[in-house]
Image (cartoon, rainbow, N blue to C red):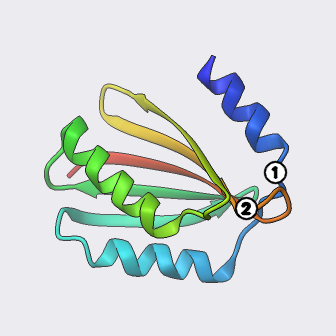
Amino acid sequence: MKNELFELVSKNIRYGLDPGLDIEINDFLADLDQIENFFVSAHESMYVIHIHVSKYSIMDVNVIFHTLLMYLEYKGMTFYTHHVFENSIEYKVVSAANFEVGFCCKIRFMQS
């Protein structure tokens, strides 16, 4: 159900890549001590972020994710889903100022 709802919300927002946003993502993640390394790329108008963390637990990852989200999100609305896999935790995020301006990203956390 949550995937269908996420797709419904995300398809109604015009999102794209903002050159400044990937710089903000890189700067923010580089300053966090809990992150061993990370990689930011773009694929089909979506940011894809892979993060290796030193302390890998649902609680630790959740704190890092929400800290990143507070830093990046637009104030109009933010919607996300998360999935816990055997070796990773993945979030999909859509954030928008309005239906004209927004971004979408997939964030995967893994143990270092």
Q: Position of residue 76 (x, y in %)?
A: 67, 59
Mark 1 or 2, nearer chain start: 1
Quadrant in the picture for residue 32: bottom left
Q: Which residue is mark 2?
A: 102
Q: Are marks 1 and 2 in contact (CB under 8 Å)?
A: yes
Q: Which residue is mark 1?
A: 13
Residue reaching furthest to the left: 55
Q: Tell me the CA gap for discs 1 and 2.
A: 7 Å
Task: Residue at 72%, 64% (x, y): give it.
Answer: 97
Q: Nearer the viewer, residue 77 or 1?
A: 77
**Is residue 80 rendered to the left or right of residue 98?**
left
Q: Position of residue 4 (x, y in %)?
A: 71, 23
Q: Nearer the viewer, residue 22 or 75?
A: 75
- Residue 81, above or below 93: above
Q: Nearer the viewer, residue 51 or 2?
A: 2
Q: Nearer the viewer, residue 22 or 39?
A: 22
Helix, strand or loop for disc 2: strand
Helix, strand or loop for disc 1: loop
Task: Residue at 82%, 41% (x, y): give it.
Answer: 11
**Is residue 58 rendered to the left or right of residue 73?**
left
Task: Residue at 22%, 64% (x, y): give it.
Answer: 36
